[in-house]
Amino acid sequence: MVSLLSRYNLIQHVHQATHTAGNLLDLVITADSDNQLVTDTTVTQTCLSTDHYLVSCQLQLAVEQPSVTSFSYRDTKKISLASFRADLVQSKLFQCSDDMDANAYAELMNNELGLSLLMDRHAPIKQKVKRRG
């Protein structure tokens, strides 16, 4: 096994038996170039197993903070359609005159008396932060 590890530039960090029969069964292997990643390797007898020893080590790994993204949304699934329809019929959107052109009606929909006010009442904007990756 030693020749196989050296052939691929690998290092075995456990150097003593990990089984009561004297065999080395548990391995901690790194690339030779990453040999500083594993330190303080120990083999300890514990009550967790009657024939295997506990292998422990310290890993020198950098912990990267996950990137986050924040966004806003409306939870439209929770809107009561009956209540929304009732408020919509009572809004200025249904009280416009027949001589109003499309641009004026679009402006009415976009101003505070239009859809945004209704949406704010029935599905307010929520902010959420989510981890990426």
Image: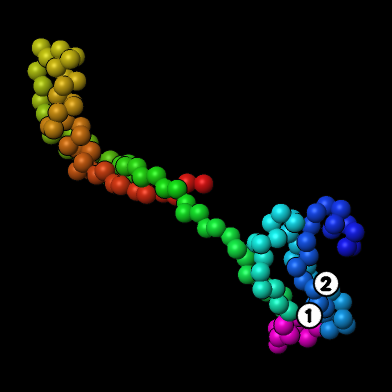
Residue 22 falls in image quadrant = bottom right
Residue 7 in the image: above or below residue 60: above
Identify the mark at residue 25; answer none if there is no mark: 2
Does the segment drawn in magenta span residue 86? no
Q: Label 1 amino acid?
A: His
Which percent across, then down, holds residue 18? Answer: 80, 77
Q: Are marks 1 and 2 in contact (CB under 8 Å)?
A: yes
Magenta region, residue range = 44-53
Task: Give the image location of residue 34, x and y in percent.
Answer: 69, 56
Q: Compared with residue 56, is residue 102 higher up or lower down, i.e. above or below?
A: above
Residue 16 locus on image (x, y percent): 81, 77
Question: At 66% from the left edge and 69% from the top edge, which residue is drawn?
Answer: 39
Q: Which quarter of the picture shows residue 97?
A: top left
Q: CA distance from mark 1 to mark 2?
A: 9 Å
Front residue (pair 54, 4): 4
Our reading of the magenta stretch's main secondary structure is loop
User: Left of 80 or right of it: where is 117?
Assistant: left
Q: Label 2, secondary structure: give it.
A: loop
* Precedes in sequence: disc 1 or disc 2: 2
From this view, report whether residue 28 is shown above or below residue 119: below
User: Would you say 67 lies left or right of 122 here?
Assistant: right
Q: Which residue is mark 1?
A: 52
Q: Quadrant of the N terminus?
A: bottom right
Q: Position of residue 91 (x, y in %)?
A: 13, 32
In the rendered image, which quarter is residue 46 located in? bottom right
131 relative to 45, above or below: above
Element under label 1? loop
